[in-house]
Amino acid sequence: MNIATSPASIAGISEAEWQIRCDLAALYRLVAHHRWTDFIYTHLSARLPGPDHHFLINKFGVNFQHMRASDLVKIDMHGNIAEEARGLSQRDVNAAGFTIHSAIHMAREDLMCVVHTHTAAGIAVSAQKDGLLPLSQHACKFYGRIAYHGYEGIALDLDERERLVADLGQHKAMILRNHGLLVGGTSIAEAFLNIYMLERACAAQVDAMSSGREPILPPPEVCQHTSDQFRASETEQHYAMVWDAALRLIEDGKPDYRG
């Protein structure tokens, strides 16, 4: 769709914001494509450029497979809707989603995009005492590079933001105990790759542990070497290649996510 004739452009949204809206809407559809959704109850967000510290999050109640750029809600770090002209209210944003995402965006300016999921595999691993095990190559990506946050109930208490941020530290991935998964990325493309790898790692762990047989774990030095190899490949060029391939999975979606 031509940016000059897009609904967002007509409404006075900048070209930069419109592109972020399109990419975030695409990310929602990719989450739906991979069946990482929990009906309407999880959330993805993206920081917008500029001094106002605004970020985009989904309009509560829109199915992820139908998400469009125009369905995303712009809010500030205090939860205020920045688009009063569209007739939106606080009820249009998931309160728990605001708590989690605002915490990360306030503390980690390097993380432009944040993804939170409640998949069966992610929840299962989050409830296991040992957390994510280096059972697979996917899991080794996060070796020594994943955080844990204890369950405190539905994330409605703004005081939890400080503890979320403290537990995350400088990592880009965190397991929310008895809850699900959380990842961030310097771009939407990186965030997609991080959640893809973490979801695959959790699914492989659940399958491996379900056999009831003792698993084989690589030696710690091999796990660290693998993690370092992944780190060396973490470039925007690599993320863009993965992102372009991923977008082909949803290019026939109706209505168009760029609407």
Image: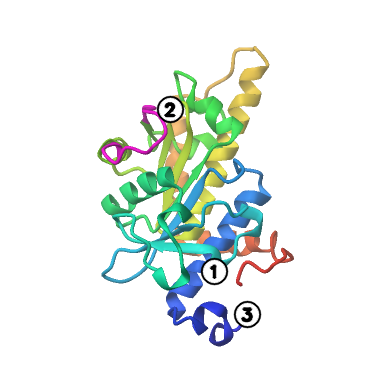
Residue 51: % across, % down: 26, 70
- Is 156 one of the magenta-colored residues? yes
Q: Which residue is mark 3?
A: 1
**In the drawing, what numbered circle is on residue 96?**
none
What residue appears at the point 52 percent right and 45 percent down from the top-left corner?
Answer: 195
> What element does badge 3 sit on?
loop
What residue appears at the point 43 percent right and 79 percent down from the top-left corner?
Answer: 14
Mark toward the viewer: 1 or 3:
1
Q: Which residue is mark 2?
A: 177
- Is 56 one of the magenta-colored residues? no
Q: Which residue is mark 1?
A: 70
Residue 85, image quadrant: bottom left
Q: Residues within 10 Å of mark 2 (few under 14, many from 20)?
A: many
> What element does badge 2 sit on?
loop
> What element does badge 1 sit on?
helix
Q: Which residues are magenta?
A: 149-160
Q: CA distance from mark 3 to mark 2?
A: 41 Å
